[in-house]
Amino acid sequence: MTDHASKPYKRVVVKLSGEALQGDSSHGLDAATLERIAKDLAIASENGHEVAVVVGGGNFFRGIKGADTGIERARADSIGMLATVMNGLALEQAIEMQGRPARCLSAIPMPALCESFSRRAALHHLNKGRVVIAAGGTGNPFFTTDTGAVLRAAELSADAVLKATQVDGVYTADPKRDPNARRYERLTHDEAIARSLAVMDTAAFALARENKIPIIVFSIAEPGAIASVLSGGGRSTLVAP
């Protein structure tokens, strides 16, 4: 059990990568994986937590990789933001199929597809017990969805950011490549920045530090992972002041 088990995380922002939704596929959406993660989010909501989700778009398009192919960076990031909306809409339906209400809100206005993101709208839906999917990143190029997740957490006065990854916390090195990599139980934001730990970008850590927002890094690979973290179980790393 983690050392932050007793902390009451009433309202949280869950950060999902787009790749988390593709399962074992090389790209796109894997139906079974989408269903599993949606069920996990629905259970967290049913357990009384107010849940917002920020999802990336890397399973369809990553802005930074698009820029590497010759697309202007600002334009490539815009394409990436559109990819996050596709994932947001898919998550919205998948969560509703689990019997929980959900609303996809986009930082880029798309009234024909979903609501535009605003703090007031997001808080309204959270207070109604709906899972909020904040898509479209920050609505601006040059910012990652990690930074977007911390920004939304600050706007919504969330108690924590839950950073879902493919490993069970923050390590001294990539544990898939280095068998001697050591997992941290707890870090400060300053330590994460100083050690250049790549689990989130520096801007995200800095914004979390400024707003005193804890970040819990955990693996999304197993069913029930989100609910487990919220109940204090499982393996994870806490990044906090």
Image: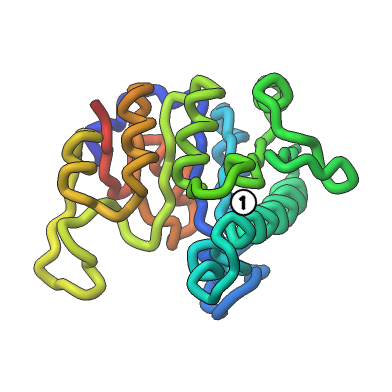
Q: Nearer the viewer, residue 128 or 54?
A: 54
Q: Badge 1: few (under 14), some or many (20 or more) residues near its Cα, within 10 Å?
A: many
Q: Which amino acid type is marked by label 1? A: Lys
Expressed as whole percent of the image width and height from the top left, the position of residue 22 reads: 57, 70
Residue 157 is left or right of residue 118, and the answer is left
Q: Quadrant of residue 159?
A: top left
The quadrant holding residue 62 is bottom right
The answer to whether residue 174 of the structure is visible from this angle is: yes
Q: Residue at x 76, y 35 (%)?
A: 116
Residue 68: x and y in percent read 48, 72
Expressed as whole percent of the image width and height from the top left, the position of residue 63 reads 55, 62
The reply to whether residue 35 is visible in this rendering is: no
> With 189 as the anchor, is 66 left or right in this view?
right
Residue bearing the label numbered 1: 39
Q: Residue furthest left?
A: 180
- Indicate whether 72 appears above or below 56: below
Where is 37 relative to 202, above or below? below
Say which element carries label 1.
helix
188 lies left or right of 97: left
Q: Position of residue 114 (x, y in %)?
A: 81, 42
User: Residue at image x 25%, y 39%?
Assistant: 2
Q: What's the residue at 69%, 56% (across, down)?
A: 82
